[in-house]
Image (cartoon, helix red, strand yellow):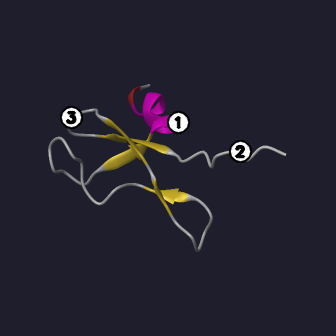
Amino acid sequence: MAHVPEQLDQYVCENCKIVHAGTSTATSGGSEPPDSCGACGKDVFVQASEWANRYE
């Protein structure tokens, strides 16, 4: 049986619109946004799946 890699959530930085992979959390089994954006340093993220809904 082949191993299926974990699918982490993707997060979009609201400041510069760069997409980041979530940080895996062992306790909840999910993922959370990074502490800060690697491009601009801001810490405001929205899940990529909700990104389009922000501007409707």
The vertical placement of 14 against 30, above or below, is above
Residue type, numbered disc 2: Val
Q: Tell me the crowding category of disc 3: few under 14, some 14 to 19, or many 20 or more residues within 10 angstroms, Cα based.
A: few
Spot the residue most to the right.
1
For label 3, the SS is: loop
Residue 5: x percent and y percent?
64, 46
- Tell me the residue that label 2 is attached to: 4
Q: Residue at x 21, y 46 (%)?
A: 38
What is the spatial separation of the Cα atoms under label 1 and label 3, in whole angstroms? 17 Å
Which span of residues is magenta-colored? 48-54
Magenta-colored stretch includes residue 9:
no
- Say which label, 2 or 3, has the lower sequence index: 2
Which residue is found at the position 18% from the left and 41% from the top? 39
Residue 41 horizontal side relative to residue 53, left or right: left
Q: Nearer the viewer, residue 3 or 11?
A: 3
**Along the line of sight, the residue nearer the viewer: 46 or 22:** 22
The location of residue 4, given as percent across then percent down, is 71, 45
> Relative to 52, does residue 47 appear above or below in the rendering?
below
Task: Identify residue for label 3.
Answer: 16
Residues under numbered marks 2 and 3 in contact, where contact means CB atoms less than 8 Å apart? no
Image location of residue 55, percent across then percent down: 39, 27
Helix, strand or loop at mark 1? helix
Q: Residue most toward the front?
A: 1
User: Of 8 and 55, which appears nearest the observer?
Assistant: 8
* Mark 1 lies on residue: 49
- Dominant secondary structure, magenta: helix
**Sequence-first tag of 2 and 1:** 2
Q: Amino acid at mark 1?
A: Ser
Q: CA distance from mark 2 to mark 1?
A: 21 Å
Distance from disc 2 to disc 3, alpha carbons, whole Å, reads: 32 Å
Whether residues under marks 2 and 1 lie with C-beta atoms below 8 angstroms apart, the answer is no
- Please state the horizontal and vertical placement of residue 46, each as a whole percent of the image: 40, 45
